[in-house]
Image (cartoon, grey):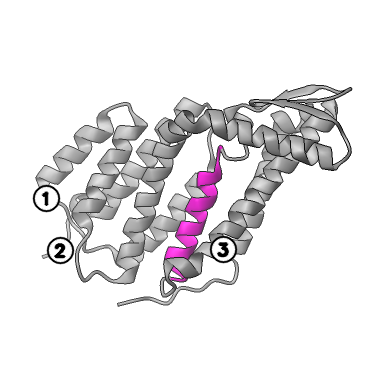
C-alpha cells in the first residue's frame, strides 16, 4: 500500500519546525536566513531516509492542536512529541540523525525564548567583563559594572541581549549538530565535542571583538551595532563557521 503524503511524518516535522521558527522571528522582530538554510539541509536528509515514517490520526490531532497555539514553546513541544513518537529501537544512524536534529532545533527555540532570558543577567555581565579585560590588555583603563563597560576618557557601552556574544550561540550549535549527525555519524559524541568547542570559541571571540570595536570608537559603534554592516559582520562569522563544519564533508549512508 502506498504511503499517503498527509501521513508522512517528515512533512509534519517540517511544518512544525517552520511554524515554531516563524513565531521566534515574529517575537524577535527579524528574520534569520541561516535557520532556513539549516532546515533545508535537514529536509534533504529527511527526504532520503525517512519516507516510510507515518503517524496515526490521534498523534496528528494532538500535533495540530499544539502548533495552532500562538506560542513558539508549545510548537517546540509539538515537535518533541513527534520525535518521541518516531523514535524506535533498531533505527539506523541516519534515522536517528534526523530526529536528533529536530530535537536540537526545538531545544534552540526554548533556549532563545526562555532559558537565555532567565540567564541573561549573568551572561551579559560575563560579556561585559570579557570586553573590559580585552580593553585593559589593549592599554585602556575601564570601569565595569554588571553589563555596563566604560572606557575611561571615552564612551560607555551597555551589553543587551540583542548584541550579546551568547545570544545566537544556539545557531552555531545547530550547525554543528546538523554537520556531525549527518557527515560524521560514525564518531562518538566525545570525538565531535572538540569541533563544537572550536566553533563556539570562534563565534564568541568574533562577537567579543565586535563589542571591543564598539567600545573603542563611536563610529565603530554606529557601524556594528545595527544595520547592514552589523548584519554583514554576523553573516561573515556564520559563513566561516559553516565552511569549517560542512566543506569537505561526505555522508556515507548507514543501515
Marking on residue 233: none
Label 3 element class: helix
Give the mark nearest the N terminus, 1 or 3: 1
In this view of the protein, can residue 220 be seen by the observer?
no
User: Left or right of 207: which side holds 153?
Assistant: right
Q: Which residue is labeled 3 in the image?
A: 195
Q: How many marks?
A: 3
* In this rendering, the label closer to the viewer, 2 or 3: 3
Type of secondary structure dominating the magenta stretch: helix
In this view of the protein, can residue 11 be seen by the observer?
yes
Query: Where residue 229 sits: x, y (%)?
Result: 74, 36
Q: Which residue is labeled 2 in the image?
A: 2
Residue 90, above or below 30: below
* In this rendering, the label closer to the viewer, 1 or 3: 3
For label 2, count other residues whose C-alpha is less than 10 Å away and answer few (under 14), some (14-19) or many (20+).
few
Depth check: 56 or 137 in front? 137
Residue 58, above or below 219: below
Query: Where residue 147 sits: x, y (%)?
Result: 64, 26
Which quarter of the rendering shows the C terminus?
Answer: bottom left
Query: Where residue 215 sits: x, y (%)?
Result: 79, 30
Which quarter of the rendering shows the N terminus?
Answer: bottom left
- Identify which residue is drawn at 15% across, 39% down: 61
- Identify which residue is drawn at 48% across, 46% down: 36
Label 2 element class: loop
Give the mark nearest the N terminus, 2 or 3: 2
Question: Magenta part of the protein: which range?
Answer: 167-184
User: Left or right of 184: which side holds 73?
Assistant: left
Depth check: 186 or 136 in front? 136
Give the mark nearest the N terminus, 1 or 2: 2
Q: Which residue is labeled 1 in the image?
A: 56
Amino acid at each position: 500500500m502506498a504511503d499517503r503524503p498527509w501521513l508522512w511524518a517528515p512533512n509534519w516535522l517540517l511544518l512544525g519546525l517552520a511554524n515554531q521558527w516563524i513565531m521566534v522571528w515574529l517575537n524577535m522582530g527579524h528574520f534569520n536566513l541561516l535557520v532556513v538554510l539549516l532546515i533545508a539541509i535537514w529536509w534533504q536528509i529527511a527526504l532520503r531516509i525517512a519516507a516510510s515514517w507515518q503517524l496515526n490520526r490521534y498523534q496528528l490531532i494532538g500535533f495540530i492542536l499544539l502548533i495552532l497555539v500562538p506560542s513558539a514553546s508549545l510548537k517546540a513541544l509539538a515537535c518533541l512529541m513527534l520525535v518521541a513518537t518516531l523514535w524506535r529501537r533498531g533505527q539506523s544512524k541516519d534515522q536517528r540523525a534526523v530526529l536528533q536534529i529536530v530535537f536540537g532545533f526545538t531545544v534552540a527555540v526554548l533556549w532563545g525564548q526562555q532559558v537565555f532570558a532567565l540567564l541573561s543577567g549573568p551572561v551579559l555581565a560575563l560579556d561585559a567583563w570579557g570586553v573590559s579585560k580585552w580593553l585593559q590588555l589593549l592599554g585602556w583603563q575601564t570601569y565595569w559594572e554588571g553589563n555596563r563597560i566604560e572606557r575611561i576618557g571615552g564612551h560607555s557601552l551597555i551589553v543587551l541581549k540583542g548584541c550579546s556574544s551568547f545570544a545566537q550561540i544556539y545557531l552555531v550549535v545547530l550547525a554543528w549538530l546538523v554537520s556531525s549527525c549527518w557527515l560524521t555519524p560514525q564518531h562518538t559524541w566525545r570525538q565531535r565535542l572538540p569541533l563544537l568547542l572550536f566553533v563556539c570559541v570562534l563565534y564568541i571571540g568574533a562577537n567579543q571583538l565586535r563589542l571591543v570595536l564598539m567600545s573603542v570608537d563611536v563610529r565603530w559603534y554606529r557601524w556594528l551595532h545595527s544595520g547592514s554592516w552589523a548584519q554583514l559582520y554576523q553573516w561573515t562569522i556564520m559563513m566561516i563557521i559553516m565552511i569549517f563544519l560542512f566543506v569537505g564533508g561526505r555522508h556515507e549512508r548507514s543501515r
